[in-house]
Image (tube, grey):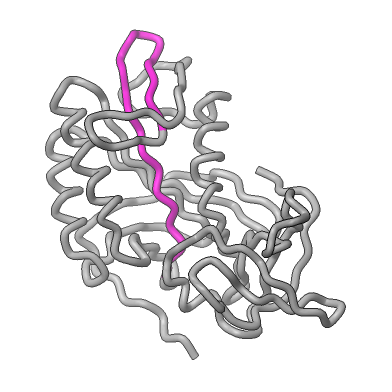
Amino acid sequence: MDYGQCEIGSVVARVSRFTVTVLRQDGTAVAAHLSNTGRNKELLVAGNPISIRRAANPERKTPFDVLAVQRDGRWINIDSLAPNRVVRAALQDGSLQLPGCREPYVVHPETTYGDSRLDFAGSDAGGTKWFAETKGVTLANGTLAAFPDAPTTRGLKHVHTLTLAQQAGYQAYLLFIVQLPGITRMTIYHERFPELAPAITQAKAAGVRVLALGCATGPDFIDLAAPLGFDETLPFTEVDVV
């Protein structure tokens, strides 16, 4: 997925949950909207390169949107809308295969099941009905990525809903989209939200397919890449922020 025209500046500070002050190359400081509500403390460090693009609405108080931040030589996409968009495109063009389902897929975005709203529902060529929920992953240490970056009761609810759907006869998928390159494995950050890993283990036992998908990224693009190893029992330690 290409964002089109963007510009690279540097992080000044995260001034609120949804706003980052960015220093542009012409020396002016602007407010940029941050759609990602995670902590991002190791990314939004003063001086880190950051890519932004002008918002579609010129009257908005934050005239730019944050796309990605560079740390340790790699661009980490922190656009919270990107995982859903790249998965939808890949499901529709057949570049993403769902294990246990036969192409082509009928894909319906934003579907309610029980008391949850899931990202996708659909059916395969054989009539198998499925649900899928995507989660963006931006937290990493070396080649190991982890989710979540912040406690997520909503994410836990989605895992429970996928488990119920699987038990009701649907095929359910939990898709982790790792929004940075150079990752080989993914885990769940137990210390950040202890309830999540056991829920995922139970979901897998019920038949829910859990997939971690890598990405190629840059300041102005993000594309799905190869599948990654996933093990919710692996330990994870955050990088030190200097």
Main SS of the magenta part reads strand
**Is residue 101 depicted above or below 8 in this figure?**
above
- Compared with residue 137, is residue 205 higher up or lower down, i.e. above or below? above
Q: Is residue 131 magenta?
A: yes
State the residue lying farthest toward the top: 126
| Count of numbered tags | 0
Q: Quadrant of residue 171?
A: top left
- In depth, the one of 15 and 238 nearer the eye is 15
Compared across the picture, whether 233 is left or right of 227 comes to left
In the image, taking residue 242 as reference, residue 93 lies left or right, namely right
Q: Position of residue 142 (x, y in %)?
A: 44, 71
Q: Quadrant of the N terminus?
A: top right
Residue that lies at the very extreme toward the bottom in this rendered image? 242
Q: Residue at x 75, y 79 (%)?
A: 29
Tell me which residue sits at (37%, 66%) in the image: 149
Up/down of 52 relative to 176, above or below: below
Give the residue displayed 50% in from the left and 37% down from the top: 87
Side of 137 relative to 27 (left or right):
left
Residue 163 in which image quadrant = top left
* Residue 239 horizontal/vertical position (percent): 41, 80
Image x and y of residue 203, in percent:
17, 41
Q: Residue at x 19, y 56 (%)?
A: 197
Q: Which residues are magenta?
A: 120-140
Percent across and percent down for residue 143 are 43, 66
Q: Nearer the viewer, residue 239 or 52?
A: 52
